[in-house]
Amino acid sequence: MIERHGQPGTESLARAALARPIAEVAPQHHERLDGSGYPLGLRDDEIITPARIIAVAT
């Protein structure tokens, strides 16, 4: 359940009239450069820059 907490945020942001990458930040903000994050196990350049910034800031 904890690893899926970004999904509601993703859905809400996708419906909002915001720039597209913003909706991708919610599911990616717990991803890690080494691939150990969640929910998708993204690594390195697969993680968008805004999500990397939020990960550092939180």
Image (cartoon, rainbow, N blue to C red):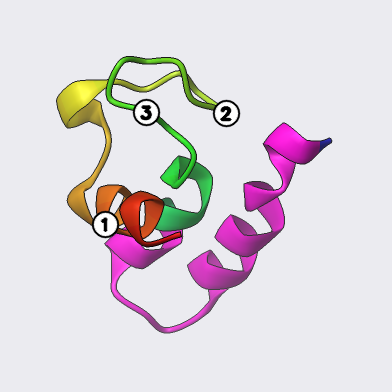
Q: Name the residue rendered at 52%, 70% in the picture.
A: 13
Confirm or deny contact between disc 3 and disc 1 (CB under 8 A). no
Query: Count the marks: how many?
Result: 3
Q: Nearer the viewer, mark 3 or mark 2?
A: 3
Q: Is residue 54 left or right of residue 14?
A: left
Q: Name the residue rendered at 36%, 22% in the picture.
A: 42
Q: Main secondary structure of the magenta part?
A: helix
Q: Which mark is residue 53?
A: 1
Q: Residues within 10 Å of mark 2 (few under 14, many from 20)?
A: some
Give above or below for 2 relative to 35.
below
Residue under numbered circle 2: 39
Task: Please report the bounds of the magenta region as a residue range.
Answer: 2-23
Residue under numbered circle 3: 32
The CA span between labels 3 and 1 is: 12 Å
The CA span between labels 1 and 2 is: 17 Å
Q: Nearer the viewer, mark 1 or mark 2?
A: 1
- Give the camera-side residue of 32 and 48: 32
Q: Name the residue rendered at 84%, 35% in the picture.
A: 1
Q: Is residue 43 left or right of residue 10?
A: left
Confirm or deny contact between disc 1 and disc 2 (CB under 8 A). no
Query: What's the amino acid at mark 2?
Result: Pro
Q: Is residue 28 left or right of residue 2?
A: left
Q: Quick one: label 3 or label 1, which is nearer the N terminus?
A: 3
Q: Residues within 10 Å of mark 1 (few under 14, many from 20)?
A: few
